[in-house]
């Protein structure tokens, strides 16, 4: 009862209700919230601190910044928000301002990639059948899962595709520009109640052992300096008997991709992937190949119960 009263008191203020409503639709940083609400950073920081301490919001650090969003167990917050009128003029104005900020940030991020000579939609750049690859990957996922992790989420496309199949989908990426694009996608699709993104290093994921029922590494390993370590870390955060799916290029002779697209590896064969998965405590199932200008293979695996791995990540 005390926890419930604390949460109700924390929400019982107009600005804090507006903050809850905004952060329920998309993760936002303090500067974004200042722009939307037209209030000072010290004032909003005090409101956000109260909401975080009450458990109505969670603070996710990202470099020198931090984003605020509803936590996975935000039952009370959603109950409160369900009682707010959708046509309230202030809330509607807040939503429009937040959408404008997200769109501006997404445009800036995509421009940064173009100006740097990079194409952030790699499957399109390589002429790969993105739809076929996505459908093959989704077919290998469990019918339902409590928590899915997409490592190297990029623009968050996989999060969008699985939002109606999982209780919670989380994407991680090292690039802030990619995260800006993914956050814009999540906000536009209205899936913030199931999907979120955060910045993280795939070699040192900030999650407890066994935190996820399913983990995906889609078109990530060919960029990795140490693919075996990335696979081991993905397996560490996977629940025993959970599903790990690797989707990446099969071996190819396109040496130009190593220079033009900064690939570290010219594709992977079954033996290499099977060896890394076995060392990480996973049993591999039959791979699937999706034909195209470059063949893409999907390697589904399951985490073996009772396999012990070194623990070094920070528990949530």
Image (spheres, rainbow, N blue to C red):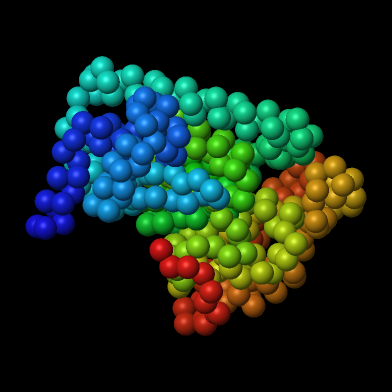
At 60% across and 75% down in the image, what residue appears? 280
Q: Quadrant of the C terminus?
A: bottom left
- Is 203 drawn above or below residue 158 in the view shown? below
Q: Position of residue 289 (x, y in %)?
A: 69, 53
Q: Quadrant of the N terminus?
A: bottom left
Between 151 and 46, the residue placed more toward the observer is: 46
Task: For residue 286, say whether it is visible.
Answer: no
Quarter of image, res 47: top left
At 46% across and 46% down in the image, what residue appears? 66
- Is 293 drawn above or below residue 222 in the view shown? above
Between 117 and 158, the residue placed more toward the observer is: 117
Q: Position of residue 205 (x, y in %)?
A: 54, 63
At 46% across and 55% down in the image, what residue appears? 148
Q: Position of residue 311 (x, y in %)?
A: 52, 77
At 58% across and 65% down in the image, what residue appears? 204
Task: For residue 63, say whether it is visible.
Answer: yes
Left or right side of 231 for 243: left
Left or right side of 261 for 213: left
Tag count? 0
């Amino acid at each position: 009862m005390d926890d419930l009263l604390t949460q109700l008191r924390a929400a019982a203020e107009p600005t804090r209700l507006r903050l809850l409503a905004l952060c329920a639709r998309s993760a936002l940083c303090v500067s974004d919230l200042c722009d939307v609400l037209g209030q000072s950073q010290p004032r909003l920081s005090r409101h956000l601190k109260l909401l975080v301490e009450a458990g109505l919001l969670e603070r996710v650090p990202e470099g020198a910044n931090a984003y605020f969003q509803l936590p996975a167990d935000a039952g009370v917050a959603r109950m409160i928000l369900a009682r707010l009128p959708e046509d309230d003029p202030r809330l509607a104005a807040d939503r429009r301002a937040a959408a404008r900020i997200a769109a501006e940030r997404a445009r800036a991020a995509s421009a940064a990639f173009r100006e740097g000579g990079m194409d952030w939609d790699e499957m399109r750049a390589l002429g790969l059948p993105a739809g076929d690859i996505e459908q093959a990957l989704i077919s290998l996922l469990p019918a339902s899962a409590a928590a899915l992790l997409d490592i190297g989420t990029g623009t968050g496309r996989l999060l969008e595709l699985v939002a109606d199949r999982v209780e919670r989908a989380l994407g991680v990426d090292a690039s802030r520009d990619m995260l800006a694009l993914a956050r814009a996608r999540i906000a536009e699709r209205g899936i913030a109640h199931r999907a979120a993104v955060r910045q993280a290093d795939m070699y040192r994921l900030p999650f407890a052992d066994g935190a996820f029922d399913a983990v995906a590494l889609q078109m990530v390993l060919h960029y990795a300096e140490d693919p075996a370590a990335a696979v081991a870390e993905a397996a560490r955060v996977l629940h025993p008997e959970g599903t790990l799916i690797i989707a990446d290029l099969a071996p190819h002779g396109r040496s130009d991709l190593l220079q033009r697209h900064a690939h570290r590896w010219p594709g992977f064969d079954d033996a290499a992937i099977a060896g890394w998965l076995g060392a990480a405590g996973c049993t591999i199932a039959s791979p699937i190949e999706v034909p195209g200008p470059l063949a893409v293979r999907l390697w589904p695996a399951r985490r073996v119960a009772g396999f012990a791995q070194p623990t070094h990540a920070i528990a949530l």
